[in-house]
Image (spheres, helix red, strand yellow):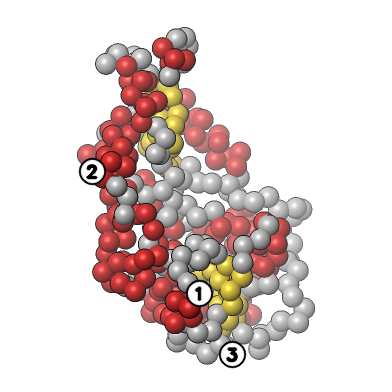
Amino acid sequence: MKALANKGSIEAVYAYEDGALETFRQARESGLKCIYDLPIAYWETSRNLLMKEAERLPEWAATLGGGISDSQEKLERKTEEMELADIVVCPGKFVSDSLPSWAGDKHLITSPFGSPETNGPILPLERRTDRNIKSPLRVLFVGSMGQRKGLGDLFAAMRQFSPREVELVVMGSLLAPMKFYHSRLPHFRYERGRPNEQVLALMRSCDVFCLPSIVEGRALVMQEAMSQGLPLIITANTGGEDLVVEGQTGFLVPKGSPESIAEKIAWFLDHRTEIPGMGESARAHACSYTWEGYGDKISKGIGDLLSHFTPALSR
């Protein structure tokens, strides 16, 4: 904070949700602009969505996490951070659309995350040689094992299929005892967390990636899965709506709709021979998102906006 008092040529400060308040307060006193990095949907939108999930699927309520149990003090801090912000940086449309109506005067910069780098040109991916069209379709879910990620809906969809048709592979952190998950879906393959290279190898052993989230910022795991040749079944609430070229890189499904998830899984079952081509399209599309592009868009956006701001007055 002392550094802001001797700001010199500094025009603005950049801070992240839950860690911005004191910096923003001092910046306002020093006449500086406040740039707010919001990595996940604004708290009011998140809370409303998760409260509805607790009512719709009460058995999964305990897995919804802090989004419905944050203290009033924490929520007031988040609100004041947003009030003080001049520019809000978001990773996708879902987050930018989640801002409250009273924040309509904020300047938005939306820049999607980059994808993992893949070596060499886009070539057919190596896949397990012992798998064929008669093997069970392997659907992969990666994430914390709760209903914020839509796991309850995915389990409900999977109950419509025989394990001989579709195998669900779940990798993530437990938010409830394992017996709870098996009570909801007896047959699924659980995989523990592991180093990233091993996660990517697991992805390559699967056919489709499914993340039917209720609330996200932008789940980077989607682009990781695409980089390994997996088409997607996701909701727009993952923050990755732009990743889906319908029918080419995967499919969007409505949030909270096991029926829609099951419909798309059934489509992949009926179109097994099209999956490798969709996987290549997914991989190519993921490669168009780079970390350099992510940073450049934010830097340029901040520079353009600061050049148009009138000199700030100390408050």
Question: Where residue 164 is drawn, which disc sits there?
Answer: 3
Q: Residue at x 31, y 56 (%)?
A: 68
In terms of secondary structure, where does tag 3 sit?
loop
Let me know if residue 214 appears in the view.
no
| 71 left or right of 148 in image | left
Location of mark 2 (residue): 101
Q: Quadrant of the C terminus?
A: top left
**Of marks 2 and 3, which one's residue comes earlier in the chain?**
2
Residue type (three-letter) at the residue carrying disc 2: Ser
Question: x, y (%) of residue 269?
Answer: 55, 83
Task: Identify the mark nearer the N-term, 1 or 3.
Answer: 3
Query: Label 1 crowding class (10 Å Cα cut-off): few <14, some 14-19, many 20+?
Result: few
Q: Nearer the viewer, mark 2 or mark 3?
A: 3
Query: Disc 1 vs disc 3: which is toward the camera?
Result: 1
For image coordinates 31% across by 37% down, the residue present is: 77
Q: Are marks 2 and 1 in contact (CB under 8 Å)?
A: no
**Residue drawn at (32%, 60%), measured in percent from left and top?**
50
Q: Are marks 1 and 3 in contact (CB under 8 Å)?
A: no
- Please name the residue shown 59% across and 90% down the image: 164
Question: Which one is in front, 298 or 191?
Answer: 191
Circle number at residue 178: 1
